[in-house]
Amino acid sequence: MKVTVKLTPDEITVCQILGRMRSLIARGANVKDAKVGNQDGMDADVTGMMAEYAFAKQMNCFPDLGLSPRSGSADGVLKGKTYDIKSTKYKTGRLLATKKVNDDVDFYVLTVVNQNSVDIIGWAWKHELINKNNLKDLGHGEGYCLEQSELRSVV
């Protein structure tokens, strides 16, 4: 069962600024854009920041607001476990990860970002997503994929 997190106009503004700044810093440091799909990289970074912020808000933990260039690190820590937030704008979106395995992550979370809210769809342990049985090519190269129905509920 999904959880919807409403963001205030001020929270959205903070996420937009941080997302854009992260994008500029990462590209300036030659960090490869690891998004899956053909969306604009800066838009993807803003969407990702909104998702990260909303998850932290819902779970009562502090979001990573850092602006240093990074590649492949976790997005936060919850109860001693590291997580990676995956975001999409598609209501039927899937939990996706590239074939580059992130050693810093314990579990993955799927979110759907709307204009002023974020739906936290569900989550999966790393070994549940990063599994050769989950390799699929959705038109942008092969990667790991789980359907929403295969995810654990956040409530």
Image (cartoon, rainbow, N blue to C red):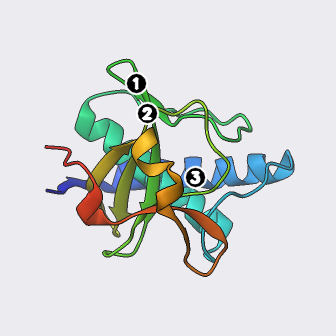
Residues at marks 3 and 1 touching, judged by CB atoms closer than 8 Å: no
List the residue tagged with mark 3. Answer: 19
Question: Dividing the image into 4 quarters, which one contains the C terminus?
Answer: top left
- Residue shown at 58% from the left, 52% from the top: 19
Please tell me whether mark 2 sits on a helix, a strand or a loop: loop
Query: With 83 as the anchor, is 121 left or right in this view?
Result: left
Distance of mark 3 from mark 1, alpha carbons?
A: 24 Å
Distance of mark 2 from mark 3, alpha carbons?
A: 13 Å
Query: With 50 as the anchor, is 92 left or right in this view?
Result: left
Q: Position of residue 127 (x, y in %)?
A: 44, 40
Q: Say whether disc 2 or disc 1 marks the residue closer to the N-terminus.
A: 2
Which residue is at the front of the view, 28 or 137?
Answer: 137
List the residue tagged with mark 1. Answer: 81
State the image quarter where residue 60 is shown.
Answer: top left
Image position of 35 with respect to 51: above or below: below
Q: Which amino acid does label 2 sit on?
A: Pro
Q: What residue type is labelled 3?
A: Gly
Q: Say whether disc 3 or disc 1 marks the residue closer to the N-terminus.
A: 3
- Among all residues in the image, which is located at the extreme top? 80
Q: What residue type is labelled 1?
A: Lys
Q: Position of residue 138 (x, y in %)?
A: 55, 78
Distance of mark 2 from mark 1, alpha carbons?
A: 14 Å
State the image quarter where residue 103 is shown.
Answer: top right
Q: Position of residue 34 (x, y in %)?
A: 68, 57
Query: With 134 as the anchor, is 125 left or right in this view?
Result: left
> Mark 2 Cα within 10 Å, few/some/many (few <14, many 20+)?
some
> Mark 3 Cα within 10 Å, few/some/many (few <14, many 20+)?
many
- Residue shown at 34% from the left, 66% from the top: 147
Label number found at residue 63: 2
Question: Dividing the image into 4 quarters, which one contains the N terminus?
Answer: bottom left
